[in-house]
Amino acid sequence: MLSFSNHEYNEKAKEYIEEIKNLSKALNKESQDFIKTLFDLGNARYYSSFYGYVDIFSEQTSESLKTKKEVKLDDIFPKSLYPAMELLIGKKFFKIFMAIAKNITKTPFSVGYFRRMVRSKNYFNYISILITLFKKFIDLHFLDIDALKILKKDYEKGLYNLDNNPYYIAYEIDNGNKEVIDLIKSALSSQKSEIDLTYYIFQAIFISSNKELVELTGKLLLAAKLQEGVRQQICENMDRGIQENFEYMFKIIYDNDLIRFSSVKRSLATWTGLAKNDGTDISKIGKKELEIINKLITNPKYEDELLKSDDNIEVYLALWNKSTRDVKEAVEAIEKLLKSSKYHIKLLISYYLHIIENKDYQREIAKKMIKEYSNDNKNIVEILACYFQFIINYIVGHKLKSDIEKGQIKAENYFKNKKEALEFFDILENALSLITEKRKVFSPCIFPWNSEFIDTDILAKTLGLIAIFYPDDTLKAKVMKYIKEIDAWERQYFFEILFEKPNNKEEKDFVIATLSDRSGAGDAAYEIVKNNDLIKEYPREIEDLLRLKNGDKRKSFIDLLMTQDKKALLVSIDNLISAKNENKRLAALDILNQVNSKEKALYDKKEVKKLIEKISKPTDAEKILIENLSDKKKKESEDNLNKLYNTEYDLELAYEIKEVSKLSKTIKKNKKGEYIIENIFNPKNIFTKTSDELFEIIKKLSELYIKNEDYEYMCFYTKEYILLRDGFSITKDVTNISYSDRQQLANFPLEDVWRDFYKKEIKDFSTLWQLNVLLTREYNGGINDSNIKECQDFYKKLLGFDITELKTKLKKANLKYIFTENYYNDTGYVLEIISMLYKEYCKENKDYLFEIGKVFTGYLLENFEAKDIVEQKERYNKEIYYNVNIYYLNPGIYYLFARIIPYLEFYSNEKSFIESFILRYNLDEKIKKYTNENLKGCEIGGRRKGLELRDYTIAIVLNIAEKDLIYKEILEIENKTEDEKKEVFWSLDTYMNNYRNILAKKENKRLVNLNQFMLNEALKIIYDEGRKIVDYLVQNELKRGDSPTIYSKLLHEIDRIEGIDYLVQILQALGKETLDRNSYYWGGNDTKKSVLSHLLKACYPSEKDNSKELA
């Protein structure tokens, strides 16, 4: 309601809402309250773990009328609200709305994907439909859109879903709106018409009482050449209107045996509800059901005979037929059947309950049936499989706590009182004892095509939920037995709520035992132990858990032990190091390595030595950790890092930007020793053509396209001949070509015509670039309705003209084939040609683009602070994160910078590389300094920098930086985001492999696409220094215990290490540990087992290795 994708209308809507609020002050109190509530809630919805998205305004209205037996229209919209309603939707739409509302009970109240053909005289069932309809009329009144405009789609872009107004269209049909009727008749009668036939038009026809339109629809259904899609549209919607129209269409289907078509069969299954979901095997539904429905239409009394049948289909369709008149009749019949029927009919009623969209009634029937069979161990599980879904269908664990706190989930929603809840607790506990598998399936059940099942997961969750609703130590003790039945992904949420504050020894014992659970429940137990300081009570139990091998669990156990004071921790170390179990001893050594690796060791040398001596025969894995504790090894570790690089190295690249008429061949420095960046352009002389001159070029290209619009060619995708006017599509076989590479002029029709246009009319690349920048989506994607004025002002100051002027003029001129009606991407065929011409000719004009890149990057450095280009963003859940706009996919007003800065990749010699490197390095440092100082600990999405490993290495080759720079880039990761860490390690591994391929003279397609300037020299340095870095990282990993190093997880990005020595050392470090194979498929984690398993997989023989070496 009053919320649009079109920004302009959204702003107008805000003003309109304020105007309505002010005008409402003159109305009666009820009207004022109605408007206030409506606007306060607006489109508000909440997500319920049980019901999905719920419209709050509709829910509140339903809640207020819930206890009323027969709800009338006046109960929902009493006369006291008429003034408010007229103010909101105007007199015209108010009259229309009330007329529709008075007749709405003639149509089904069930809507949406799982709708059924069920009506009611009780307006309670229509509350949601009526409120949704009223909100639609608010929009139509505000937008001044009538039925004709809806049908013709004669409204602004950015206004969506307006065609979803079948009740309004039906009203116009029934009130004799000739233009509306003629438009629809034309669409039904001919292939070419002003409007398209849509689902909503068919719905409007069936809601209306216009026999002529219904008869025309019937003829369309019978048309010999009718496509399956249109047949499906008709049949799927014929149940959406009045009964008379349904019966007329059904007779056509019956008389002409249309049930042979799958679309008709699917529709029959939908009208009746015989198909509960997409997975239903509709092949078993057909003629029998059709015959029964035909008899029911001919003789409604036949349904009473069917209700006495033992045939499930016959009983079901009798109930269905009653509900097509009034669901109340079906409910009364169900009550009788429940009292007297056989077991299989009682199961059948569960299938029918899906049709009745009253959750309270469904739940009461389900509870009644479950209670009836609660002592029947033979049938209770099947009863639960059929009925329990109406009490509790699913629970989304991660929102459970907040839903309960907000009152969106409460005990009263499901149980009358505590007594009933406890009764169900006993029933479900008994059922769990009867089920021997995770899911008990009954197939077939009720119908041959249907199966029902019950999961122990939902039963255990419900036990947990009852214990949460009614906190009780006895209930919690019982839940402990079944909590492992809850799905591993959800278990933690129930565990956390139930045992957040353990009340007694039994609960504390259970929390400690759950520490070893490998699901999230284990992590929750870790937090509970920590928050409740249970380590003081359970140090020995946690020590004992270190017998386990799971790396993640071991880390958490060690972390808990290390929260103890010095004395208590020493006792734990002593216990562990004295144990027979190797895993425990390794944990003790890991703890010692951690507490004694700091500047001030926790324990002195004598204490450590005494502890180590308790291991009489250390294993290979233990030897490594023992060796790490020696002073010699500690010194070696520090020396190794200092030998690798100068950790204090800092690169500063001062520069001066100077505008010149002619570029020098070499880079120069000024008297201050600053590099001179030469520019032959400035921002205000880059665009050499006026908007009028560029307009004329595009106009000529449009005219050229029109001249060729009857050109016929074969589309590669459809394998059909089409005219140029109907599409600009690929003609060549592009099967094995990537999507980006497919968009080449050579793959499209009339390529030479467009190239000739470039040479004769556009004439030079500078003009082509200007057209591309100002018109194609790739460059102007940052402009939208919300920031257009800001963009105009921003770039007018920078460039000296309005960059939106050309596009505005072209749109106003409405020239053919330039733009489309698509709101999100309005690029027409003419602009596609401009884009492809640019891609083709930019390859030979990279020097020109490079110079533009220098101008924009220099301007950004000189005129903006880092805070200007780092933008705060907010996710739907209110989480805050930051983006560096110039490196982001949606850069807002900085869109031109984001597209042009990458031109600095087009360096071609020593001078241009140094200029490029200096500008990008200073920009990166500026952003890095700002984010490190101001956004430490904040999430930064996407990239923060333009340079990468290859650029640093070329700078080293050219002596403008030292090798220390690449070591700092790779090893100093404390201030990097997770993505940046992964990217630099991935780059290291990838470039090293690229160089291996060069040495092996293997083809490498990736290298072809990289800038070739000094590439081989750079790769050699990366390879040589990279081997030293990788060796340092691997050696650190081999020496660790269960606690990870800062690089552990990143080693999964290294896919090749070489040498028998590595193989032997990895196997030695693994000891008796089995391999972690999961990480082969999903990337692994930082556990010792995971990382070493990956390194073993990544280990290859070096050139020097041979079988003798291995022996």
Image: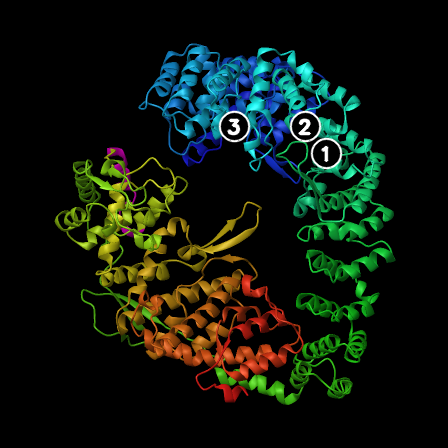
Q: Does the residue at mark 3 contact the one at mark 2 (Cβ under 8 Å)?
A: no
> Label 2 is placed on what type of residue?
Leu
Q: Where is residue 463 shown, x and y percent of the image? A: 78, 44
Q: Earlier in the sequence, mark 3 or mark 2?
A: 3
CA distance separating discs 3 and 1 = 27 Å
Identify the secondary structure beneath mark 3: helix
> Label 3 is placed on what type of residue?
Lys
Q: Does the residue at mark 3 contact the one at mark 1 (Cβ under 8 Å)?
A: no
Task: Magenta stretch: give its range.
Answer: 798-813
The residue closer to the viewer here, 1012 or 488, is 488
Residue at x 25%, y 58% (from the top left corner): 682
Q: Nearer the viewer, mark 3 or mark 2?
A: 3
Residue 980, placed above or below residue 708: below
CA distance separating discs 1 and 2 = 9 Å
The residue closer to the viewer here, 272 or 449, is 449
> Label 1 is placed on what type of residue?
Tyr
- Please indicate, yes or no, whether residue 1039 appears anywhere in the rendered image: no
Residue 660, placed above or below residue 416: below
Q: Where is residue 797 shown, x and y percent of the image? A: 31, 50
Relative horizontal placement of residue 516, taking residue 507 as reference (left or right): left
Residue at which label 1 appears: 387
Residue at which label 3 appears: 265
Q: Which mark is residue 353?
A: 2
